[in-house]
Amino acid sequence: MRLIPILPKRPIIDMRRMDERVHARLRDFGMEFVEKMEAYPPAMPWKGPTPKSGPRRGGRRTLALKRGWPLGFRMGRYEVTVENSVKYAEFVQGRGQTRHMRRRHWQRTDEVVKGLWPKHRRRIAEALAGK
């Protein structure tokens, strides 16, 4: 008995197009994440007198934290890395967030990811399935 394999006429999955679709979905996730993290909570009144000198003079915001989020980000094969370059970002929006920043309604990075991930996970799964 002779066995003859049944071969498809063309590849079932176009890996190059799949990679492009997955990268596009990951890029969308990264861009939406950065957009959410750049948003400042509403300003709260100072409990004491405002600073008389320096960048916070008169109680104004410096927007340094917002500028620390990158316009672009590093992407691996199937990963996206977004980091804030401001040295105190960890204490305002990261896992080391202080109670003071929490009371001022600063978003934490892990909370934003938790909120965005279900929607983007579905889109990435669709891209992997070729949809």
Image (cartoon, grey):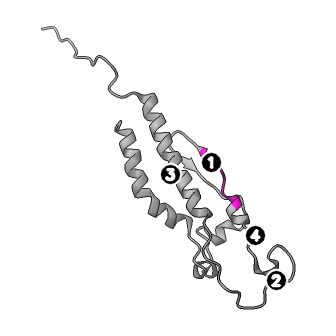
Instruction: Name the spot of residue 45 as percent of width and height, x first.
Output: 68, 86
What residue occupies the far bottom of the structure in this picture?
A: 48
| CA neighbours of label 4 inside 10 A, class few (<14), some (14 to 19), many (20+) | few
The kind of residue tagged 3 is Phe
Secondary structure state at the residue bearing disc 1: loop
Residue marked by disc 3:
29
What residue occupies the far left of the structure in this picture?
A: 1
Which residue corresponds to the image point at 64% horizontal and 71% vertical from the top-left? 92
Instruction: Name the spot of residue 20 as percent of width and height, x first.
Output: 48, 35
The kind of residue tagged 1 is Phe
Pointer 1 or 3: first along the chain: 3
Q: Which residues are magenta?
A: 67-74
Pointer 1 or 2: first along the chain: 2
Whether the magenta-drawn stretch holds residue 100 is answered as no
Q: Considering depth in this image, is 67 or 14 the residue closer to the camera?
A: 67
Instruction: Name the spot of residue 2 as percent of width and height, x first.
Output: 16, 8
The kind of residue tagged 2 is Pro
Secondary structure state at the residue bearing disc 4: loop
Report how far apart the C-alphas of labels 1 and 3 lie in the structure.
11 Å
Which residue corresponds to the image point at 50% horizontal and 51% vertical from the top-left? 29
Residue marked by disc 1:
73
Pointer 4 or 1: first along the chain: 4
Which residue corresponds to the image point at 51% horizontal and 48% vertical from the top-left? 28
Secondary structure state at the residue bearing disc 3: helix
Instruction: Name the spot of residue 98 as percent of width and height, x first.
Output: 63, 77
Pointer 3 or 2: first along the chain: 3
Which residue corresponds to the image point at 40% horizontal and 57% vertical from the top-left? 118
Residue marked by disc 4:
62
Asked where in the image residue 43 lies, by quadrant, the reply is bottom right
